[in-house]
Image (spheres, grey):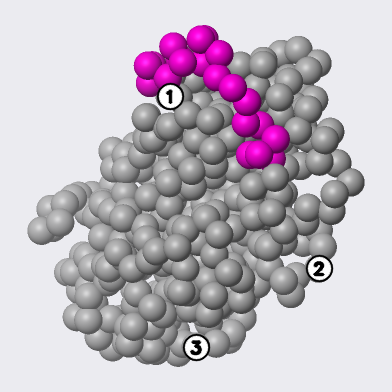
Amino acid sequence: MSYREWRAEAGIVYIRDDWASGGSRADLILFDCDGVLIDVRPSYDAAIREAVSYIVSKLAGRPVTRPVSRRLIYRFRHSGGFNNDWDTVCAILWGIAAQLPERWAEDFLRADEDLAGQGLHDAAERFMAYIRCLRRPKTLEDVLELQHPFPSAPMRRRLLELAERADSSGLRSVERTILEQWGGSDLRREAFRAFQRFLGYPGEPEQSIVIRVFNELFYGAAYCRERFGWEPRFHLGPGFMDRERPIITEATLRWLERAFGRARLGIVSGRSRESARRTLGERLEAFNPEALVFLEDEWSGVPEGVAIGKPEPYGLWRAVRAMGEFRRALYVGDSAEDALMVERARDARFEFIGVYGTGYGAREKIAWFRARRAAAILPTVNELPELFDRHIG
């Protein structure tokens, strides 16, 4: 599939040849938030790193000196199964726990047995109880290990391999790799299962250590009290969300309203509406309020067993149905999950536009988007006006 190219101020734009002559027939356009409308590099990625470091350091009894890399986070997202950052945190925690020394597995199983039946449903209570049980006098071997980077280089390499083997089934593929390909003793496998139960993920936010720690870091203490009604236990300061900034400009929004009309502009995002509103502010009012689908807000109202997270097309169809009939629909996203969501809609009226300039691995993204026949590939969402005004027939 051939593409024509031109250089914009922010980088190179790629346009699929056969789409360039017919792109103007699109009569509605939908957007992802993270990496498209909002720069999340200082927020979501940082919250993933800090959540993993916090949980691992407390459970392992030693500081994390080699935090999660952007490369590892990107590898999981590139698989197409990790649009939800809670999933990414969980996968990395599984991968680290499965590699901790066998004596740690023994200690964890002992703690799990000692605490069984105590009804520790609240995530914070359960976390603190396990930490107390895992504390023990340090041996000479423990003290010597503190002089080395943690996680070690072999552990980090194996985490990257775990991410490389992940696929669009998400956590199921990670669990399969750990249990079926990594192998290990029966004790390790039993400890891994106990660790999964301990994390409580997936599960209710109040009961899941993954969700509680991540949300307190991302949203901040005050917001967690206000929105979730829980008293923060893991992080008492402001959240990483406060560091976010809009990517989409007022000029681009004005062009979109002229080109498509407010009624034909929508959002399908994995985050919550309130977090998007806090960062986008009045910019959110440029979109059709009936076509705003924020999947984090949808989970509680969905029947058990119904998959709504990307790359499932639930959000895509929910948004376009709010807009009525359409000829062609565009979805602008920055991840493998976004492109796969459009494919899984199985409707030729949908086209995907990829954005590569606001995240890690731009060259790989461009190559992947081209391989999936993206209609266009842009450095940022703000190249849309020039794309249509100058290059689409």
Q: CA distance from mark 3 to mark 2?
A: 24 Å
Q: Amino acid at mark 1?
A: Phe
Earlier in the chain: of badge 1 and badge 3, it is 1
Q: 10 Å neighbourhood of mark 3: few (<14), some, or many (≥20)?
A: some
Q: 10 Å neighbourhood of mark 2: few (<14), some, or many (≥20)?
A: few
User: 343 or 250, which lies in front?
Assistant: 250
Q: CA distance from mark 2 to mark 1?
A: 41 Å
**Disc 3, SS:** helix
Question: Is residue 64 shown left or right of residue 233?
Answer: left
- Label 1 vs label 3, nearer the camera: 1
Quick check: is 146 in the magenta stretch? yes
Quick check: is 103 in the magenta stretch? no
Q: Is residue 251 visible?
A: yes
Q: Which residue is mark 3?
A: 289
Residue 367, located in which quarter of the rendered image? top left
Q: Which residue is mark 2?
A: 303
Q: Please provide percent x and percent y for residue 356.
A: 31, 50
Q: Please provide percent x and percent y for residue 5.
A: 20, 49
User: 152 or 114, which lies in front?
Assistant: 114
Earlier in the chain: of badge 3 and badge 2, it is 3
Q: CA distance from mark 1 to mark 3?
A: 47 Å
Q: Which residue is mark 1?
A: 150
Earlier in the chain: of badge 2 and badge 1, it is 1
Magenta residues (range): 130-149
Q: Looking at the image, which residue is at 70% across and 45% down?
A: 129
**Disc 1, SS:** loop
Q: Looking at the image, which residue is at 48% across and 43% down?
A: 54
Compared to residue 82, the image places residue 190 above or below, namely above
Q: Amino acid at mark 3?
A: Pro
